[in-house]
Amino acid sequence: MTVFQLILLGVFGGSLGTTGLFLYLSSREDPTAMILENQSKTIEDLAKIQSTIEQGKIEIQKNLTDTDLLEVSCSSTYMEKNGSLLCREMFCRLQTREGSASSQTECETISNVANTFFIIENCSKYDIETKKCFEYIEKRK
């Protein structure tokens, strides 16, 4: 073999090797494109999940502010027997859930009044002194 043939063989072999390597590397998928595609799918899925959660929250809010919840506690029969404080407290809480009208503090005040009446009623039922009942109520608050 002559020097010319060796040079020609080296150039030809090197060209083929370089071309083959170039074609192999360019034929592989670009990982950044695949990552971006997966990322966009993930963001779409998260948006769908978040939308579903928001719809569920709206549905729960509707159920919590549904006046059907007041049907029993605000019925005239129930209020004649037990008083109107439970109806007032539940109505107050429904108004608080809607985000308008009453505040949580107002509802707690109604609840405290109802609890105080309950304690005093039970104290008198068991013949406990009213003074001791009031002391207990004050400690409780």
Image: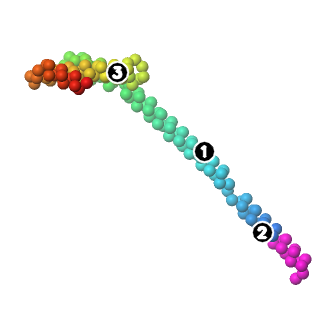
Q: Secondary structure at mark 1?
A: helix
Instruction: Check residue 17 in the rendering and tell me which mark sits there, or answer none.
Output: 2
Instruction: Name the residue type under label 2.
Output: Gly
Other-residue count near label 2 (Cα within 10 Å), few / some / many at <14 / 14–19 / ≥20: few
Of badges 1 and 3, nearer the viewer stands 3
Q: Is residue 38 visible?
A: yes
The amino acid on which the numbered mark 1 sits, given as a three-letter code, is Ser
Residue at 38%, 22% (x, y): give it: 96
Residue at the image position 59 percent from the left and 49 percent from the top? 38
Badges 1 and 3: C-beta atoms under 8 Å apart? no
Identify residue type, mark 3: Thr
Residue at the image point whose x is 65% and y is 51% from the top: 32
Whether residues under marks 1 and 2 lie with C-beta atoms below 8 angstroms apart, the answer is no
Q: Earlier in the sequence, mark 3 or mark 2?
A: 2
Query: In the image, which is nearer the foreground, mark 1 or mark 2?
Result: 2
Picture quadrant of residue 69: top left
Position of 21 with respect to 105 (left or right) is right
What residue is disc 1 on? 40
Provide the major secondary structure of the magenta segment: helix
Mark 3 surroundings: few (<14), some (14-19) or many (≥20) residues within 10 A: few
Q: Tell me which numbered mark, 1 or 2, is placed earlier along the sequence.
A: 2
What's the magenta region? Answer: 1-13
Q: Which mark is residue 105?
A: 3
Q: Does the segment drawn in magenta span residue 62?
A: no
Q: Quadrant of the N terminus?
A: bottom right
